[in-house]
Structures are given as C-alpha cells and as structure tokens.
Image (cartoon, rainbow, N blue to C red):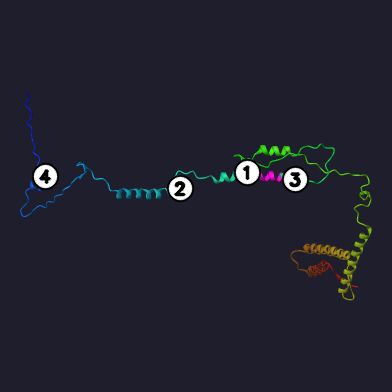
Amino acid sequence: MASKPPKIFIKSKSGADRDEESIYNKINPPSGVAPIVRTYVIQPVVSPTGEQQPSAPSPTGARKMHDDSSQIQNILNPVHGPRDAQIRAGIKPPNHAKSNISAVKEQSSLNQLRKMAVQEEKSFPRGQGARSTSAPTRKPIQRQCSVEAGEGGRDFLNENKLVAGMPPIRLPRINSTKDDGLKYLHKPDFGRVPTYLLQRKIDLIDQQESEMRAREAALIPPGMRLLPEDERLETLTVLQKNRHEVERALQALPLRIETPGQIRRRDELERRLREIEEGLKVFARPKVLVKM
C-alpha cells in the first residue's frame, strides 16, 4: 500500500505577529537603506448581538442618489403642460373638446325648439280671430319643450313628436266679390304715361336746345357763322380723298428727279399735301367757323 502523504500543520500567528509581519522582513535591504513600513488596521462593523455586519450606506448618500436620478429623469423626459402632469400622476385629464361639442349640440336643439314654439305662437295668436264653425273643435295639445340629448346631442324622437303634433297652417280666407274696385286695371291706357307729361318733356328739351344755340351764337364773332355738322363731315370726306390721291401721285414719281419739270411737279404735290393736312386739322374739330 502506498504510504499517505504526511500532514502539514501550520500554526496561526497572533494578531501582533501579523501586524509586525512584512514582506520587507524577508528581503535583505542594501546597506544604508531602511524600508518604510506602514500598517493599516481594518475593523469590521460589530452589531449589538456581537455579529460582524458589512458597512451599510448612509441615508444621506441614498437620498442624494435618489435626487440625482429624479433630476436626470426630469432632464431626459420633461413635463409638457398640466395635462402631462395629470397623466403622470395617474389622473385622467378631462376632454374639453368632446364636452363642448355635446353642449353645442344640446344648445342648438333647444334653440330650434324655441324657434318652433315662437313661430307657432305667431301663427296662432291667443284671443285673435274668430273661430271657424265649419272645423270641429278639438282639445289643444300641450307641448313640452324639453330635450333630453344623449351622447349624439340631438333628440330626434321629441322633435318628430312636436312636429307631428303641430296643426297645419291655415291661410287667411279672402272674400272676393265681383265689384271689388279693380276696374281701373282693365282700362286701355293703364300703365301709360299721360300725354301732357310727354308734351312737357318735349317742351323742356326744345327749350334747352334753344338756350344752348343762343349761348353758342353769342360766342361767334361778327361776320362768321357756325358750319353745320353735315357740311363739316362732307368737307372732311373730300379732303381725305384728295390726300389719298396726292400721296399716290407722289409715290408715282421716279426715285431720281433731275429735270426741272419733275422738280416742279414734286414741289406742287408737296404743297397741295400740306394744304390738305391743314384743312383736315381744321375740319376735324367739332365746331368750325366760316365766313358768311
């Protein structure tokens, strides 16, 4: 049988021996040099029962870490308005838009029913008009203008009941007779302007024209007269025709004019053209004065 290895027993050293032990004790220091030895003693935390416990973090440090994390959370995800704050706090914010829509629909239904009630009162005023004996009397219907609007906002059932219960609108009866005083509508001259008014208008126009002629005659110098409109237009037409003929004659002349006859012909045509242009300027005016 193989022999068992010998057991080695190591004797634990005391605390004083461990405190004094150093690795520098096993090293031969050089001559003239002494090593620096520092000893650190670490004592565990002892509970009141005598058990050793690890050191716990201080509450001040935990609170500081919590504050730092909340500040970082606020920086990364800031709060956007009071609605966001309510959502984060677990409170459901109110839907104002939906509430406004429901309120508007309910108010519009109430306004419509009120208008219908006012129109009914106007159509059938109390205590006015004689009751017809031909139509049977019936018990008046009591209407209640109340609307219970649901989520849709409009109560069509109540509106249909009110409309169905309203009596038909009766038009007023007109007792027409044969001799109702409308005979003047059948006259042959109905709607026409009277003759004396037409004659009065004609006289006023003639008077205005005579006054205008008198003012124009006062502006004409002695020995002159105002050319009538038809004569002025006729003279203007003749002058335009003569200008066209003279321009055609000038265009028919040769490009190179050397002989005395050609020069005289050209000068004569140019003189006539200038006279025609001056006459056109005069007779183009609305009023032309000529010698008597």
Q: Earlier in the sequence, mark 4 or mark 1?
A: 4
Amino acid type shown at disc 1? Glu
Q: Is residue 266 left or right of residue 30?
A: right
Q: Quadrant of the N terminus?
A: top left
Amino acid type shown at disc 4? Gly
Helix, strand, or loop for circle 4? helix
Mark 4 — residue? 15
Q: Which residue lies most toward the bottom here?
A: 222
Mark 2 — residue? 85
Q: Residue 162: x, y in percent?
A: 71, 39
Q: Earlier in the sequence, mark 2 or mark 3?
A: 2
Foreground label between 3 and 1:
3
Helix, strand, or loop for circle 1? helix
Q: Which dot marks residue 106?
A: 1
Helix, strand, or loop for circle 3? helix
Q: Earlier in the sequence, mark 4 or mark 2?
A: 4
Could you say which quadrant of the image residue 44 lies in?
top left
Find the distance from the CA under tag 3 to the CA under tag 1: 23 Å
Q: Earlier in the sequence, mark 3 or mark 1?
A: 1
Q: Nearer the viewer, residue 226 or 87?
A: 87
Residue 52, above or below 188: above
Mark 3 — residue? 121
* Region rendered in magenta: 103-116
